Image (cartoon, rainbow, N blue to C red):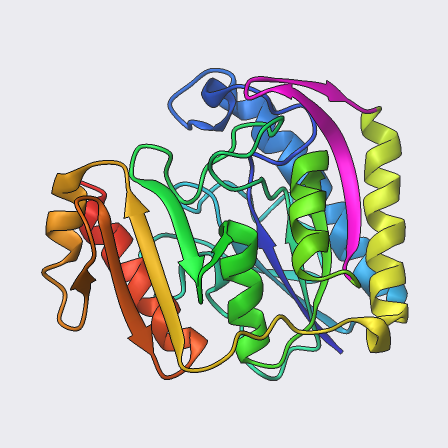
Amino acid sequence: MRVFISADLEGVNGVVLLEQVLPSSPAYAQAREWMIQEVNAAVEGAIQGGAREVLVNDAHHHMTNLLIDRLHPKATLLSGTHKLLSMMEGLESSFDAAFFIGYHAKTGTEGAVLDHTFAASVIHDVRVNDLSVGEFGLSAGVAGHFGVPAALVTGDAALAREAKALLPTIETVVVKEGVSRTAARCFPFAKTLEEIRLMAKRAIQHLSDKQPLRFEEPVRLAIDFQKTEQADMAASIPGVQREGGCTVSFEGHDFLTAYRAFVAAFRIANV
């Protein structure tokens, strides 16, 4: 059994401030340590549940946060930036389950810690077939394209609600509860690590209950940017339609095509 893990940082327990997720900040080193421990707990649980191979894709910032000498010895690390599938690089149809560790809620979610979608300064909203989604929905949609069930997600309470609304069968671990965008009730760290391990194990042992997230095809994806100039740049991509001052859209014959167009539009606009 093969398990894919996409690991972000904003949803990790103890992380509440922007400074903690920026590698240039002194506060980042401790947040990175917490991220490593949460990922390792998920890997250990997956192995205890029956996984024989675990691939971890570092999915935060420049995607070089996880340290190979600190990662669980039975996990393989996919590290580095400019990945074709971004947060979901390395996933393909031979995987049996996808985990999403340290994820966060989409832009504009009340009571969510560090809510954003890819970049708060660039994207206001993303809609797939008129359904508003964040990074979890986009990532789970990639997994669904390959027929891989989204089995586990960890983060704050707002993210857990967002994930459950899309996939009621997914296992969730709530490590903190937002008080504001930059404050949270953070639950006992050792306890949440153990819960991540246990729920990862449970997710693998009850994989038959889990479902892939599938969107009706063809897929129409729309982006509301924060600024008109960002939409100006994204509209230069062939096939992209301008739908308003800050909005562009495009259609793909399947979700992966639409997702890759989204990643390209984001990268062009994020200058």
Q: Position of residue 18 (x, y in %)?
A: 46, 22
Please state if 230 lies on the left or on the right of 152 as rendered: left
Residue 15 quadrant: top right
Q: Main secondary structure of the magenta part?
A: strand
| Near-viewer residue (239 or 176) | 239
- The residue at 62%/36% (across/down) is 11
Q: Is residue 184 above or below residue 75?
A: above
Quadrant of res 248: bottom left
Let me know if residue 183 is in the magenta part.
Answer: yes
- Residue 107, how many percent across, how many down? 46, 37
Q: Quadrant of the C terminus?
A: top left
Q: What's the residue at 19%, 66% (across, down)?
A: 240
- Quarter of the picture containing the N terminus is bottom right
**69, 155: nearer the viewer:** 155
Magenta stretch: give its range: 170-187
Q: Residue at x 71, y 44 (%)?
A: 160
Please tell me which residue is depicted at 78% across the width and 71% down the height of the picture: 210
Give the number of callouts. 0
Asked whether residue 50 appears in the rendered view, the answer is no
Q: In the image, is residue 267 above or below residue 60?
A: below
Counting from the top left corner in percent of width and height, residue 130 is at 44, 61
* Left or right: 63 in relation to 156: left
Q: Position of residue 164 (x, y in %)?
A: 73, 53
Q: Is residue 136 magenta?
A: no
- The answer to whether residue 170 shows anywhere in this view is yes
Above or below: residue 43 compared with residue 31: below
